[in-house]
Amino acid sequence: MERVFGRPLVTQEQMRTRIRELGKQISADYAGKDLVLVGVLKGAYAFYADLARAIRIPIHIDFIVVSSYGAKTKTSGKVKLVTDLTESIKGKDVLLVEDIVDSGLTVQYLLKTFAKKKPRSLKVCTLLSKPDRRQVTVQVDYEGFKIPNHYVVGYGLDYQQQYRNLPYLAVLDLADEET
Ligand SMILES: O=P(O)(O)OC[C@H]1O[C@H](OP(=O)(O)OP(=O)(O)O)[C@H](O)[C@@H]1O
Ligand SMILES: Nc1nc2[nH]cnc2c(=O)[nH]1
């Protein structure tokens, strides 16, 4: 069945502009440092690709795959590590790249896990943040957009693994689904 999408919550143009700004800021903040950009998959894939290309200093790229929502629109409360990093981050300047910080549980888990690997610094960059949904207070160092309390899809974010390739961010119409 074709799903109806409301107007984009964040357009492609708004994404492009904001990501360019974030890239500039990160390039300045990390100049001369050993930056490892860690993408939190799957959701961050689109943002990661655009952000990495907006950063104008040399970087290492790596990824981690975690999952906690499954097919639901609410967190299970348990963050599952699906695939770990490929390289050591000991002594490196690590920037976690997330698509969204919602309850905060994923970032909380990642910060705790990564701190044990002794990076020189550890920060968080997220495209989206839903402050009204936080269950735990977490550190967010770079933030693209604050958004209201809606389940959103597109630009990497899914509903039951679909819609990740939508080129903008939209609120999913969950009229006949769980909310
Ligand atoms: O702040 P939280 O409530 O923890 O939510 C944020 C996390 O939820 C999504 O991941 P998900 O578990 O849906 O996996 P996915 O990235 O494969 O979509 C998203 O990519 C974030 O990593
Ligand atoms: N697709 C999607 N995944 C999420 N994970 C946490 N919040 C969200 C959301 O609003 N949309």
Image: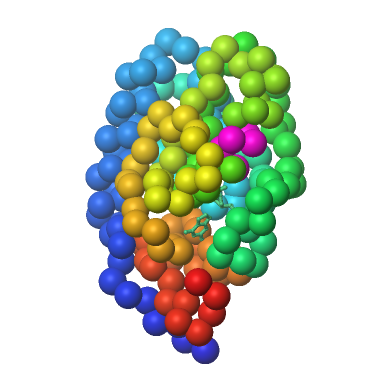
The one of 42 and 58 positioned closer to us in this rendering: 42
Q: How many numbered tags mark residues here?
A: 0
Determine the residue located farthest toward the bottom in the rendered image: 1
Where residue 45 sits in the image (x, y, percent)? 53, 49
Where residue 38 sits in the image (x, y, percent)? 57, 33
Using residue 32 as the reference point, say whether residue 115 is left or right of it: right
Q: Quadrant of residue 19?
A: top left
* Residue found 66% across the figure and 51% down from its top: 77
* Residue found 47% across the figure and 86% down from its top: 2
Say if residue 174 shows up in the picture. Answer: yes
* Residue found 43% across the figure and 71% down from its top: 172
Tell whether position 107 is magenta: yes
Where residue 117 sits in the image (x, y, percent)? 70, 20
Start and end of the magenta stretch?
Answer: 106-110
Using residue 161 as the reference point, say whether residue 51 is left or right of it: left
Say if residue 99 shows up in the picture. Answer: no
The one of 173 and 20 positioned closer to us in this rendering: 173
Up-down relation of residue 132 to residue 149 (above or below): above
The one of 139 and 167 positioned closer to us in this rendering: 139
Up-down relation of residue 178 to residue 55 (above or below): below
Where residue 98 sits in the image (x, y, percent)? 50, 42
* Residue found 48% across the figure and 46% down from its top: 134
Q: Main secondary structure of the magenta part?
A: helix
Tell whether position 109 is magenta: yes
Using residue 17 as the reference point, say whether residue 161 is left or right of it: right
